[in-house]
Image (cartoon, rainbow, N blue to C red):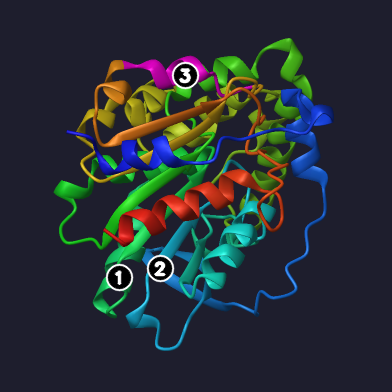
Amino acid sequence: MTSAAAEFLASREPFVAPRWLGNGHAMTVYTWARPRHFANLPAPESRLFKVAPDTQVLAHCYWQHPRTSVPTLLAMHGLEGSSAAHYMRGLAAKACERGWNAVLLNQRNCGGTEHLTPTLYHSGLTADPKTVLRTLASEGIGPVGVVGYSLGGNLAMKLAAELEDAGDLPVVAVAAISPTIDLERCVSAIERRANIAYHFNFVRNLRARLRRKAERWPGVYDLRPLGSIWTIRKFDDVYTAPCHGFKDAGHYYASESAIKVADRISVPALIIAAEDDPFVPAAQFQDRAVRGNRHIAVSVERHGGHCGFAGMASDSDGYWAETTAVRFLAAIMRR
């Protein structure tokens, strides 16, 4: 029996990269640096969700009227991203064009919210989006399609795997773009010499964020080791893992990788990735837990870089992954 995700995959438009963006590094840097403007996207409502006794997260919400009569897209960003990331706003624009709501969720501390929690975020912290989804459901919002990019893609897939145990959440489909579903493999990939620029940028931002956290929450974080931390793995070892009760970075990666629970996903799920992604190896999507689950469709394109996929001529703005993810959600919601 053909699954809904597989049916969509068979009918999708393949990605065709411009010749000058046929290199994964070029595509990744281009889509990260290129300014985008969304003239038709209205100003969002800023909303705080209480996800723990001491923690709130910020979402930027684009509502239709009435909001309870249309589908909702919930978007989750990548490492050191925010709701202001170009792909988050691109998803919002495409959702609004279809007459949907769009909720762009900032992870803990992201989007200038270091003051809203004493804790850090991590790659598998699904409790936060679950709480947001429960709140939305209590207000009559649904159905919901979830889209996650990179680290947010791992969150989206892990969330999908936990739906059966999470109660009555209104999630009907999930799409993950360049998802880091095997955290150990992805961290090892970004540690390669060819990825030094990306790695440096991520760590620089993590260090700066922790300094801001220490200012907001005196006595919570010991900054003395920070000067010697120049890898994501070391940062996770010293700060992220202990913050959330993991014994070290390796324990954290093993516990929170969506690949460990992908066989439990029972809603239609689409993975979009690229063979030339500099630091999300396509080999992880060949894992039996992924390929053996009929509810998961995997589209590994030859080109696309990391969270790139710019150049689709038939799309209004050329961002193929955003368009494909939203079309996937729409196809499932029409069933």
Label 1 residue SS: loop
Against 304, residue 196 (above or below) is: above
Task: Report whether residue 260 is seen.
Answer: yes
For the residues labelled 1 and 2, the Cα–Cα distance comes to: 6 Å
User: Does residue 261 appear to the left or right of 215 in the view shown?
Assistant: left
Q: Which residue is labeled 3 in the image?
A: 184
Which sits in the foreground, 268 or 114? 268
Task: Please give the name of the residue rendered at 73% of the width and 28% of the height, measured from the top-left corner.
Answer: 198
For marks 2 and 3, the one nearer the N-term is 2
For marks 1 and 3, the one nearer the N-term is 1
Label 2 residue SS: strand
63 in the magenta segment = no
For the residues labelled 1 and 3, the Cα–Cα distance comes to: 34 Å
Residue 72: give its label: 2
Q: Which residue is labeled 1 in the image?
A: 142
Measured as percent of width and height from the top left, residue 51 is found at: 36, 63
Q: Toward which corner of the image does residue 255 lie, by quadrant?
A: top left
Three-letter residue code for mark 1 = Gly
Residues shaded magenta: 279-287
Task: Report whether residue 124 is seen.
Answer: no
C-beta proximity under 8 Å, tags 1 and 2: yes
Label 3 residue SS: helix
Which sits in the foreground, 208 or 74? 74
Three-letter residue code for mark 2 = Thr
